[in-house]
Image (spheres, rainbow, N blue to C red):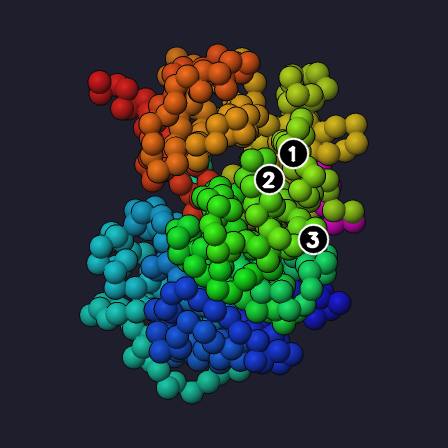
Amino acid sequence: MLLQRIGNSGIGLGTLLDRAAARHPANVVVLDHDLDVAPELGRRCTVAELADLVDDLASRLWAAKVRPGERVVVYKSDGFDIPLLAFAAARIGAVPVLLSPKLDGGTAAELLRRARPAYLLTDRAKLDAELPPTVHELAERILLAAGEHPDAVGLRALAGTPRVPAVTMPPDHPALVTHTSGTTGIPKMAVHTGRTLLARYRPQATAAALVRRRETVAVHVSFVHSRMVSAMAITLLRGAPLLILADEDPAHVAELFARLRPGVIEAHPNSFMLWEELADDPREPLANVRYFSSTFDAIHPRTIHRLLTASRRRSPRFAQLYGQSETGPVVGRTYTRRWTGGTDGRCVGMPFPGMTDVRVVSRDGRPPSPSSPGYIEVRSDGRAVTFLGEPERYRQQVDGDWWRMGDVGYRTRWGCLHLLDREVDIVPGFGSTLVAEDTLLARLADLTEVVVVPDPDGRAVPVVCTRNDRPLDLDAWRTAAADLPPMAPPVHWRLDELPHTATTKIKRLELARILASRNGDR
């Protein structure tokens, strides 16, 4: 039913909110921040109001000379208006290219160069403080979502422009460009079509059918990620209230959850780790949660257990979907309170029948196993069609219908996929760093993060963060690590010192480089 509501020819980003408003015009969206493009709208609005805002913004982009098929690179200060601006660009047939506000200005300029010819939609803060002067030559025209600049066109100055009809593009035409996490360098820019976006929603729409219609859905994911688009489509087309979070601070989140009582929460794995402390909040902000959902990466068993035990619902579930920006979700599984981690903490699930498939290819001629993990490859109709500006880099990951994920693991006799490491993060002779991290987090309650990376000599170095930055109990650490592969002494950092991607993943290669640099300076 949900897929019928979306349509069979493509996701139709530009009219998504129109269709949601036609069915549930009074449904509400609650924000924890003001929109730069429309601060007067406030933090509680109806879907009909958001649909009208997108229509208005589309007319302003048209007045700024944006036309069908042209690219609009969106790189602005963080906020929910990022996907709204993407919808507005799509509404007039343009192709939104979404760049995370967490990217530095130089990286954003390089991605703008790859997207040429393209408009740059930014704001005065980014233009003045972060973007290099070269963007004025790289962009066809610079548009401002907020503020004014003598060398840019401000959207606010175009308010009141006559509305223009929506433009329908073919389902196989580029519909959205999002960048990869950038954990291994400059991000790649994945090109999605209306058809591939629709295909990757099917697994998520199937799971959403299990949720009662009026459960409030709270979402805290990167505003430039395709998952934000799918979360909005699935939630609003079903008529469920939506709570959008830009700020992941636990105290802030606890106050909102205690007041609004979401029944479904979608967030990054690292955000859920940060929210473990909500389980101890006397207001019980997680008490009404029926489903927790994480799509971006494997999540630590301790986090799953803590969150599920904080719910007061009869049978809460934690849904984990494994995938990446290029593919969408490809395997998934759910957890209940009865699950304690055990030996399958690295199991990320099974493929979705008729929608996705997975295989593991040997790296050394031996069958993939826990001791000899192989390359994980997947097949999905939701796969991006190319990398913008880097088609050869895209082809290097393709083997017919199969896509190399860049991870290593194995499948059990029952077909469950076990994720052990990123290919580039393997520490020779150590085994799975993720398994070691899971074990340490399960045994040491005071840890809020642990990341095992190699030093220049190939030794495994654990970088640890603790609750409230308390000193690490070294005796407890030695006991917890006694049966794990040998590691260097732990290095204690603050959580905000760790380099993160737009989806809050740890940039392990960059962390290893920073660690080596600091040690070299001593």
For disc 2, the neighbor class at 10 Å (few under 14, some 14 to 19, many from 20) is: many
- Counting residues from the N terminus, which is met first, the one under dot 3 or under dot 2? 2
Which residue corresponds to the image point at 37% horizontal and 58% vertical from the top-left?
78
Please indicate, yes or no, whether residue 224 appears anywhere in the rendered image.
Answer: no
- The magenta span reads 354-360
Amino acid found under the numbered disc labelled 3: Arg
- Counting residues from the N terminus, which is met first, the one under dot 3 or under dot 1? 3
Amino acid found under the numbered disc labelled 1: Thr
Residue position marked by numbered label 2 in the rendering: 305
Label 1 near label 2: C-beta < 8 Å? Answer: yes
* Image spot of residue 291 (x, y percent): 63, 53
Looking at the magenta stretch, what is its main secondary structure?
strand
Vertical side of 522 occupied by 310: above or below: below
Q: Quadrant of residue 514?
A: top left
Which one is nearer the viewer's eye here, 164 or 522? 522
Which residue corresponds to the image point at 44% horizontal and 66% vertical from the top-left?
31
Label 2 near label 3: C-beta < 8 Å? Answer: no
Q: Is residue 76 left or right of residue 289?
A: left
Residue position marked by numbered label 3 in the rendering: 314
Please indicate, yes or no, whether residue 287 appears anywhere in the rendered image.
Answer: yes
* Image spot of residue 470 (x, y percent): 34, 32
CA–CA distance between discs 3 and 1? 18 Å
In the rendered image, the quadrant that contains the C terminus is top left
Residue position marked by numbered label 1 in the rendering: 340
Number of labelled discs?
A: 3
Which residue corresponds to the image point at 48% horizontal and 16% vertical from the top-left?
479
